[in-house]
Image (tube, grey):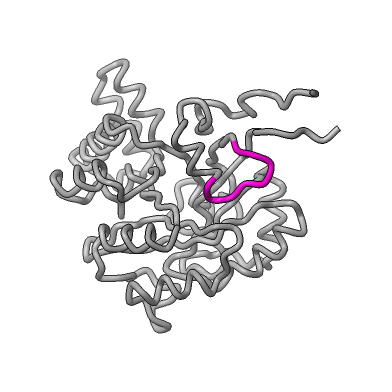
Amino acid sequence: MEYVGTRWYKCDFHLHTMSSECYEDENTDEEWVDEVLKKGLNCIAVTDHNDYRAIDKVREIGNEKGITVFPGVEVTCDTSKIHMLILFDVDKTGENVRDFLSRIDIDSNQIGKSEGTSHSVYEVCKLAKKKGALVIAAHIDEPASISKMAPQQLQKLLNEDYIDAVQVVNSEEWEEYARTKDKQKLFDTLKKKYRQNVTEETIEIWRKTYNKVLKAMIPMIAASDNPKEAGSAKHGLWGIGRRFTWIKMDKNPRLESIRQAFLSADVRVRIDNESNTMPENIPEL
């Protein structure tokens, strides 16, 4: 019997393909989608750096294999180079994403490159919302994130209707610190994780950004950003689905399904370190 009603979907909404300049593996589209299947993902978003070219092919193969593919893009905003994930609905195409990139002055010479747009984070978010897209602040507790914004600007972003959710990377470390108040252990853990390429001052900024998001009650997701290997800043096949989020949605997920889940995030969203397996089994009846 086919189950009718809401169910949990394993989702990775930050994924790079071979179109991203910093994707280092040599894979075909079929191999890439097969890795998505291997990791047990149900819903994904294609979010190459300032690019749209891989969307249609991945969606075509994904649909054949029963994977819901959301067209998307990771936009580099502002002179501060802040990354934002923009997700469009399942019936949109690479052409729609290309039109959006054109509207924020990312032309054909910049497609796929990391420079991005000089438009502010606010401008990019407002235009994305006007286009009916979903906006997720990327890796808020890592480099190239909203943690680089001045406190007043960050508060404006969190308090007003600019973003729908954030991607968090180090929630386990922040939560452990909240319990233990052991700052030295926090510093040591994250310095080891980032191979000493992070200062204690930066770690404090990341932690405060996480706390501000928490206080603002903005939904948090986990996503892989598919690194080539553990600790790598380059992208590749290995990292697909290494981080993910369970989202409870209806039978045919669309962008509105995600929005509704975010509105009830306390019962319909679970990041992987909260629940590595499906939060609850699909009932037989």
The correct choice, above or below, for 142 with respect to 1 in the image is below
Q: Residue at x 74, y 34 (%)?
A: 4
Residue lying furthest bottom in this view?
Answer: 109
Horizontal placement of 18 versus 190: left or right?
right
182 left or right, relative to 169: left
Q: Residue at x 33, y 46 (%)?
A: 142
Residue 79 spot, x, y in % from top left: 22, 66
Q: Is residue 281 found inside the magenta-colored segment of the image?
A: no
Say left or right for 57 vs 78.
right
| Magenta segment main secondary structure | loop
The residue most toward the top is: 180
Query: Residue 284: where, in percent of width, then height?
Result: 80, 24
- Outermost residue toward the right? 1
Looking at the picture, does residue 121 appear above or below residue 221?
Answer: below
Q: Where does residue 188 sit, x and y in percent of width and height?
A: 30, 31
Q: Where are the magenta residues, as a range? A: 249-256
Residue placed at 44% from the left, 58% from the top? Answer: 132
**Which residue shows up at 38% across the image and 81% down it?**
107
State the residue in front, 250 or 156. 250
Quarter-of-image position of residue 220: top left
Quarter of the figure with the C terminus: top right
Quadrant location of residue 1? Answer: top right
Q: Nearer the viewer, residue 187 or 251?
A: 251
Query: Where does the image place residue 186, in percent across and percent down from the top left?
Result: 30, 28
**Across the whole image, how many numbered discs are drawn on residues?**
0
